[in-house]
Amino acid sequence: MQIMASPAGLVGLGLCFLVLVVEPLGAYGSSRGSLGGIDGAAAPVINGICATSVTTHGYECQEYEVKTQDGYILNMQRIPEGRVGGSGGGNKKQPVLIQHGVLVDGMTWLLNSPEQNLPMILADKGFDVWIANTRGTRFCRQHVSLDPAHPEFWDWSWDELVTYDLPAVFDFVFNHTGQKIHYIGHSLGTLIGLASFSEGHQADKLKSAAFLSPIAYLSHMKTALGVLAARAFVGEITTMFGIAEFNPKGQEASVFLKALCDYPGVDCYDLVSAITGKNCCLNTSTVDLFLKNEPQSTASKNMVHLAQTVRDGIIKKFDYGRPDYNLMHYGEDRPPVYNISNIPRDLPIFVSYGGQDALSDVEDVELLLDHLKFHDVNKLSVQYVKDYAHADFIMGINAKDIVYNQVVQFFKYQQ
Ligand SMILES: *[C@@H]1O[C@H](CO)[C@@H](O)[C@H](O)[C@H]1NC(C)=O
Ligand SMILES: *[C@@H]1O[C@H](CO)[C@@H](O)[C@H](O)[C@H]1NC(C)=O
Ligand SMILES: *[C@@H]1O[C@H](CO)[C@@H](O)[C@H](O)[C@H]1NC(C)=O
């Protein structure tokens, strides 16, 4: 069985940043040291995200471990209050859960200065901020019985993020705060939120949702490199697919990317732009920091699933590529569809998308909005940022003024 591990994925799509990875960067530890208690007590994570990126700026920060129903142990950070105690007054602070995209982890939110990054801005505005990290990323490589060195650990796609990761972190935050949660997703973090909420999950724990640079429909993706990669990736599936770690910093990934860049019409001169679109507002120092910390591994199956979404133009579960295999997994010969129109119409939703975003293409976002056309009018706010591309929403130096302040306002309006 051939593992398509490869590289193809690389370009797969979320590709958010992989882009940057032509040269393999320094390796990060493949697993963590011993972990503290699961569920409940803050766990001691040496050199974790709190220690490297949050407390250094004078914020309180707690590390948690959350176990999913299928045995993965996820790492989460909580910034319970602002530097000056926040502005929440005497009232209980409202929890916000922030979910990153594919091939990165929660640290990407924290690379800009405290005045510019989303979690710290929210904390300073009086919110109780929780940062999620998905399975497979550097601090989420533990499982009750599986080992990341073995393929079984990597047998999942974004369906499992919908079915297991998201419910685990929602339950955890809800249990700790006793309050409904404001959700923020970027990129793949939007897709898993949309899919989950469309199935009616988290309804009792969710207060509102903000989708930044949403990806749902992907068939209008403009980047030649992304399209080519997605095609290569699904093209490699025949009857069997490989289950493996997809490490964008790996040798294979870099070789593959270089090969794609030789195709006519693919311009990799500026790789970031080639994949994410032309970001207007990134700080080079922040990008350097990003490259030191990201990208992160995901499962090859996850990249294939994303590539299927590009190919098929439908948001559905992982396609095993053969009717009999699908039957075995789903009881139907085709994968079940996530019907975005089923998202509860009274769920307060904020959507922000960019005119330069090559992954979250304007036409695809319009298709998404079309599926929300029966949403209660006063529950849906949409913002279009003409100059923004995919990464500006997480690292833009002016994202506070352009996007985050609107998110804060939107959340406050729901109180
Ligand atoms: C949350 O609390 C419920 C009820 O006490 C419990 O069943 C569940 O396991 C808890 N979940 C987490 C993630 O702590
Ligand atoms: C870019 O990042 C550097 C290092 O954090 C910082 O000193 C500088 O002020 C930032 N520039 C802008 C425009 O935010
Ligand atoms: C999706 O859900 C909407 C609203 O609930 C419904 O009208 C529509 O028929 C559904 N579409 C499919 C393909 O099931």
Image (spheres, rainbow, N blue to C red):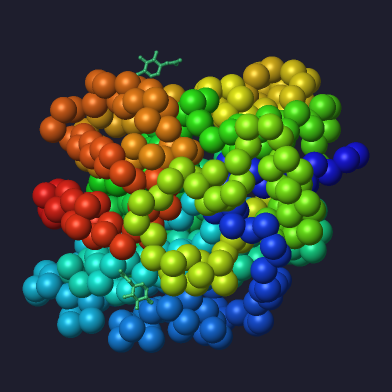
Q: Which residue lies at the image location 31% right of the left edge and 44% below the top edge?
A: 387
Whole-percent x, y for residue 7 in the image: 74, 47
Q: Quadrant of residue 309?
A: top right
The outermost residue toward the right is 1
Question: Viewer-proximal residue, 274 or 221?
Answer: 274
| Direction from residue 79 to residue 93 in the image, left or right | left
Residue 159 coordinates in the image, percent (x, y):
57, 40
Q: Up-down: is 315 above or below 115?
A: above
Q: Depth check: give the residue in front, 258 or 62.
A: 258
- Going by the picture, which residue comes out furthest to the left? 89
Q: Where residue 315 appears, x then y in whole percent?
A: 51, 28
Residue 191 higher or lower than 181, as above or below = above
Residue at image location 78% in from the left, 51% down from the top: 255
- Asked whether 363 or 63 is in front, the reply is 363
Q: Is residue 178 visible?
A: no
- In this rendering, the count of numbered labels is 0
Q: Residue at image x 68%, y 32%?
A: 264
Q: What quarter of the picture does the N terminus occupy?
A: top right
Can residue 402 be seen here? yes
Picture quadrant of residue 310:
top right
Q: Residue at x 24, y 56 (%)?
A: 404
- The percent position of residue 250, horizontal first and vertical second, equals 75, 60
